[in-house]
Amino acid sequence: MKQFSFTSTQTGIAAGARMGTIVTPHGIINTPAFVPVGTQATVKSLTPDELSTLGVQLFFVNTYHTYLRPGLSVIGSFGGLHAFMGWNGPIITDSGGFQVFSLARPKYKPADRDEESAALVKITEDGVWFRSHWDGSKHFFSPESSMEYQWTLGSDIHIAFDECTPYPATPAYARKAMDRTHRWAERSLIAHTKLWQSHKKEGKPYQALYGVVQGSVYEDLRIESAEKISGMDVDGIAIGGVSVGESKEEMKNVLQWVTPHLPHDKPRHLLGVGEIDDIFVLVEHGMDTFDCVQPTRLARMGKLYVPPNKVHTGTRDGYMIDITGKEYACDTSPVQAGCGCFTCTHFSRAYIHHLFRVRELLSYRLASIHNIHFVTELVSSIRESLGKGTFLEMKQQWLYNNHTY
């Protein structure tokens, strides 16, 4: 039995906003849902219990990184990521493709590399050869090996192996990469099915597979890809290639093109998008889950989320304050008035400012707690607004001074 299902309710709002539930072997995900990124099998500086308390339902772990360190044999000896990390909730893993294309740049410069071995990434029809960004060692990822790795990791949701199209890309290259992504998706599905049969015999739970829609910023390619991936027997749909340099307007265009061609009975995940103003747009266009490093990355820089007002409006760098600024050195107020997170109920802006100024590690924890709480509460309020039919009013309230879209 596939212990994975999805149900949704169209809200009748805007372009296709909807609410739903994703049932996995490790719990239920109420959608739409924000998915924090745990690159190295951890959301930096936070414990699994803290993530649960913050309302995190699902988080993202990178296959590329865990494959290199600590290695699949280590994680496999624990029976998978859940036991290794001490997290009992749902996990989603990527195929490794994005990191292969973006991070396979050695930090060292060996003196005697020939021209062929100097290549950082070599794409073939079989898969991708790349060099570890840690030590320059050579590795190979294919659709089949990516599926095997993700089944070993034991995540609840896998992403099919795809070619991460760079931006900008010519129409010819975008089509070449998209066609290869489709062929790799078919191979991923075949490998996934075989792996499920073998795991099922061992009494292990089902792990779902999402196919990936590509096509860069070209309408005809995006529609073709959406129809191709939707026609496959995958459990869900992931939309890729909208977080590699595209503008917000281009991201919105992709969603407008793709959404009408996706099945209503399968969950949709938007890869790598999640700035505050993005959230309203992607929800409006029917996305169910979305992952983003932004809340925690900004937190470690001292950028803390606050609701929009006359000072902090919805600009690209808005919805936040820079707690490292000298104006907060004696500020006795919490980061956000009325916020119920641990950070805001226990500490002042002045204290957090001090921690950042003296580079204390606690600064990262407190800032990350607040930012993740902020986003999960925002998305929870969005779910509530969808149920009440007030989503557009909420969107207007948050984006009233935002001219990005």
Image (spheres, rainbow, N blue to C red):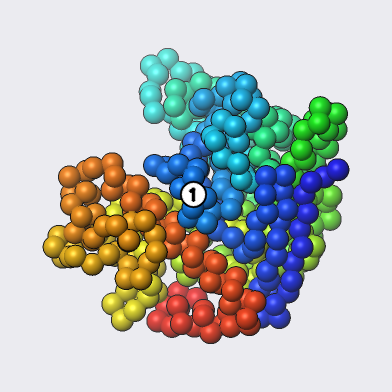
Residue 383 figure quarter: bottom right
Mark 1 lies on residue:
51
Q: Nearer the viewer, residue 321 or 377?
A: 377
Q: Nearer the viewer, residue 76 or 143?
A: 76
The residue positioned 21% from the left and 48% from the top of the image is 355
User: As displayed, is residue 229 above or below residue 7?
Assistant: above
The mark total stands at: 1
| Residue 220 in sight here | no
Residue 197 % position (x, y): 85, 33
The residue positioned 82% from the left and 45% from the top of the image is 2
| Residue 78 in sight here | yes
Mark 1: give few (<14), some (14-19) or many (20+) Cα within 10 Å: some
The residue positioned 49% from the left and 36% from the top of the image is 40
Name the element at disc 1: helix
Quadrant location, the N terminus: top right
Q: Nearer the viewer, residue 340 or 56?
A: 340
Q: Nearer the viewer, residue 253 or 385?
A: 385
Q: Amino acid at mark 1?
A: Leu
Residue 341 % position (x, y): 39, 60
Locate residue 90 relative to residue 52 in the image: left or right. right
Residue 104 % position (x, y): 50, 33
User: As displayed, is residue 10 above or below residue 197?
Assistant: below
The residue positioned 65% from the left and 61% from the top of the image is 30
Residue 397 % position (x, y): 46, 82
